[in-house]
Image (cartoon, grey):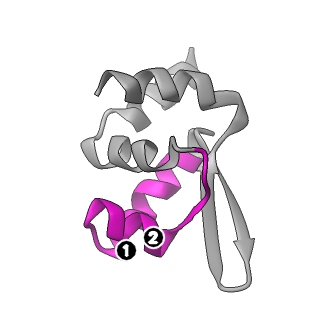
Amino acid sequence: MNELEKVLKALANRRRLLILKCLKRGEEHSVTEIAAEIQLSLRSTSRHLKILAAADIIDKDQRGLEVFYRLAKNQKVFVSRVVGIL
């Protein structure tokens, strides 16, 4: 129940849903790309990404100074359905 609650809380935000909609396409995106897509500052975008990562909804990959994000494999179907409702 704790895991489900963590996921649902992470999804209960309009900006985080926009991030997931961006990542739903199956591509990885950098923080900079995601921030531009959802029209939010890098700092705020990073905060939202941290919440999604803590809920195991997204995975991150550090490459040098840049961090890239993508949907977690175990969450793709669930997130696609949630985002599809939007």
Q: Circle 1 is placed at which residue position?
A: 43
Q: Nearer the viewer, residue 42 or 29?
A: 29
- The answer to which quarter of the image holds residue 9 is top left
Residue 82: percent from left, percent from top: 41, 23
Q: Amino acid at mark 1?
A: Arg
What residue is rendered at 34% in x and 70% in y? Answer: 36
Q: CA distance from mark 2 to mark 1?
A: 13 Å
Residue 50 within the segment the image draws in magenta: yes
State the extent of the magenta-drawn residues as a range. Answer: 26-53
Rendered-image quadrant of the N terminus: top right
Main SS category, magenta section: helix
Residue 81: percent from left, percent from top: 46, 20
Q: Circle 2 is placed at which residue position?
A: 33
- The answer to which quarter of the image holds residue 10 is top left
In this rendering, position of residue 73 left or right of residue 7: right
Residue 40: percent from left, percent from top: 27, 67
Residue 23 within the segment the image draws in magenta: no
Q: Amino acid at mark 2?
A: Glu
- Say what secondary structure mark 2 lies in: helix
Q: First in sequence: mark 2 or mark 1?
A: 2
Q: Nearer the viewer, residue 3 or 12?
A: 12
Residue 38: percent from left, percent from top: 30, 60
